[in-house]
Image (cartoon, rainbow, N blue to C red):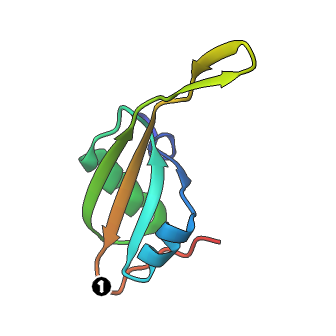
Amino acid sequence: MNNYRDIIKAPIITEKTAALNENNVVTFSVDVKANKTQIKQAIEAIFNVKVESVNVINVHPKKKRVGRYSGYTKKVKKAIVKLKEGSSIELN
């Protein structure tokens, strides 16, 4: 990975992640080739916060149909990032 912005794609904002945000936990969609160390370094560099832990979820593609055409959804990797006390990321 050349750039930290290539690793972190977008925040995931749902009701469940909003509830986790109260406990200093933020969820991001990340590059499928990134590992936990790269994700931690990217979050610390982009948002100027300290990261306590990173958990990763691989979401496999699902088969979908639209009429007679069938295909698959995209493969996604989610990172659940726990921040240290005193650190916070404001996502609007």
Q: Secondary structure at mark 1?
A: loop
Horizontally, residue 5 falls left or right of residue 64, namely left
- Vertical placement of residue 53 versus 19, above or below: above
Q: Identify the image quadrant of the N terminus.
A: top left
Going by the image, does 86 lie left or right of 90? Answer: left
- Position of residue 50 measured from the top left corner of the image (x, y, whole percent): 31, 71
Count every numbered label the image shows and give the total: 1
Residue pictured at 31% horizontal, 69% vertical = 82
Q: Quadrant of the C terminus?
A: bottom right
Give the amino acid type for the residue marked by disc 1 in the picture: Glu
Judging depth in this view, the residue of 6 and 19 nearest the camera is 19
Check the image and report above or below for 77 versus 83: above
Horizontal and vertical percent for residue 72?
55, 22
| Residue at x 43% of width, y 67% of height | 26
**Residue at (56%, 28%) from the top-left corner?**
73
Query: Relative to 81, does residue 7 appear above or below in the rendering?
Result: above
Of residues 30 and 40, the one drawn nearer to the viewer in this rendering: 30
Which residue is the extreme one toward the bottom?
A: 86
Q: Residue furthest top?
A: 68
Q: Residues within 10 Å of mark 1 (few under 14, many from 20)?
A: few
Instruction: Report x, y in % for residue 65.
Output: 65, 22
Residue 60, position in %: x, y?
A: 41, 32
Is 18 in front, or is 47?
A: 18
Residue 29 vs 87, above or below: the answer is: above
**In the displayed structure, does residue 53 sit left or right of residue 31?**
left
Mark 1 = which residue?
Answer: 85
Residue occupying the far right of the picture: 67
Q: In the image, is 81 to the left or to the right of 53?
A: right
